[in-house]
Every structure is written in structure tokens, then in C-alpha cells.
Image: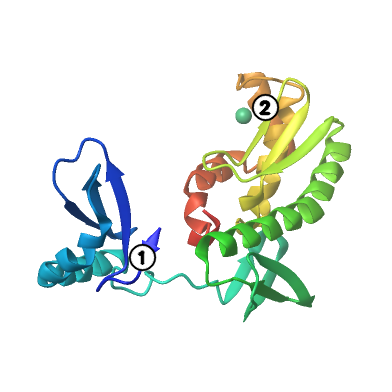
Amino acid sequence: MPLSKALFEYRLRKSARARHVRLRITSRSGLEVVVPRGYNPARIPGMLEQKQAWIRAALERAEADRKPSGPEAVWKPPDDIELPALDQVWQVTAREADAPWAAVREIGPGRLLIHGRFTDEHASRAALARWLVRQAYAHLVPRLEELSRQLGLAFRHVYIKRQRTRWGSCSRHRAITLNAKLLFLAPALVRYVMVHELCHLAEMNHSPRFWSLVQKNHADFRTHDRELRKGWKSVPRWAC
Ligand SMILES: [Zn+2]
């Protein structure tokens, strides 16, 4: 509960264990006054005044910690989004609105609007991530279905997720999961991931039989498998 009658805004915390008044300053919550049980809060403003030089210096240090210098320090939505998998580039326009959320909307060919509280990094990245997942459902799933028909390997479910360490997976229940971040990769790599997962429908392992099935359907599999490992570098920071 911030109180502002005193020289500084502060948060008051009563502690059963504290024996003296203690001042804490953190970059996250600013000034916190920890008082022992029975301490009269009316004494706080006077006490803060006495220690104001120390408090001011500590607050400045905390503020500097909170805003590290450098261009990446302040969150800003991306100016454009490139999706090599779909050969698309989106121009992003940001529009502030008094809302507790942020949302992403397509407003024209290759034009994206992020509106609402886009200055909030968490809200903004969540909205962009939701859009990315929608793109993946709209474009990657039909491709997987097409390949599935070509290869004669049928899956039962397909899911789009945003994993940190896997581009795709295939479960015993014939469910294929594709990573929405595949959209940041070249089409050939995306095809390899799809072929790889589809082949798991026939061979639930990485045996020589599995790899020869992959090779039959995707000749460049060795090169592309290697390139995939470095593929994470193609994922922009906002989408990580
Ligand atoms: Zn595999």
C-alpha cells in the first residue's frame, strides 16, 4: 500500500521479527519500510526526512538498475515481422489505446496493427505470440496435411505450440506438434521437420529404417537437420 504523505512514496511492511525500523530499496518495488510490531506509523515521515539523502541516492541507483542503458532496454514492438516460411513480411503499426490488454490485428495485405497496451512488454509479446500461432494454424497445418497425403502417412491430431527446444514432435497417439516458430525458418527446413515427424508415424524411433524413410521423402535431410540446430538464431527476440 503506497502512502504519499511522506517525502517519499513507500510500501509499509509490518514484521513480527523486525526489532528496528528498516529501509529497503529494490529496483522492483522501490522503497519499503519494515517496521516492528507496535511501531507507530505516524513516526515514519519524520524518519524518512532524516534519512532523505541516503534514500535519494539508493532510489537513483535502483532506478538505474531498472533501466539498463542500451537500445534493447525499453520494449518496443517490432517494426516488421519476416516469416520466411511463408515468404511474408508484415509491417507493424502500433496504436496506443486505454485497455488492460494488447491485441494484434491484420489491417491489410502485409499490414499488422498492434493496439491496446502495446508499451507493456508482457501484454504485447503475448498478443504477437497469439497471432503467430494463428498464422501457424492457418498455413502450416494445410502444408502438413498435404505432405501427409503425399507420403501416405496419416496423423490423427495436429497441435501448434511455442516450444523452446523442439521444432516438432510426434506422439504414440499419432499427434503431431509443430512449433509456431517454424514460421521464421526457410520453407525447405519446415518441410524437413514435417517429413521427419510424419515418418515417425511409421517408425517411432531414429533407427536406420526411420532415416532411410526420411531420405526417400526429403533428400537433403542431413544438411537440413544440421541447419535446424542453428535455426533458433532466426527467431526474433520478441518471439523467444
Ligand atoms: Zn525424430
* Quarter holding residue 49: bottom left
Residue at 61% from the left image edge and 52% from the top image edge? 181
**Could you tell me which quadrant the N terminus lies in?**
bottom left
Residue 3 is marked as 1
Image coordinates of residue 154 in percent, x first then y, are 86, 30
Q: CA distance from mark 1 to mark 2?
A: 70 Å
- Look at mark 2 in the image and give the residue it sits on: 212
Under tag 1, what secondary structure?
A: strand
Q: Earlier in the sequence, mark 1 or mark 2?
A: 1
Image coordinates of residue 223 in percent, x first then y, are 55, 44
Residue at 89% from the left image edge and 38% from the top image edge? 149
Number of numbered discs present?
2
The disc labelled 1 sits on which kind of residue?
Answer: Leu
Relative horizontal placement of residue 73, taking residue 212 as reference (left or right):
left
| Image color mode | rainbow
Other-residue count near label 1 (Cα within 10 Å), few / some / many at <14 / 14–19 / ≥20: few
Under tag 2, what secondary structure?
A: helix
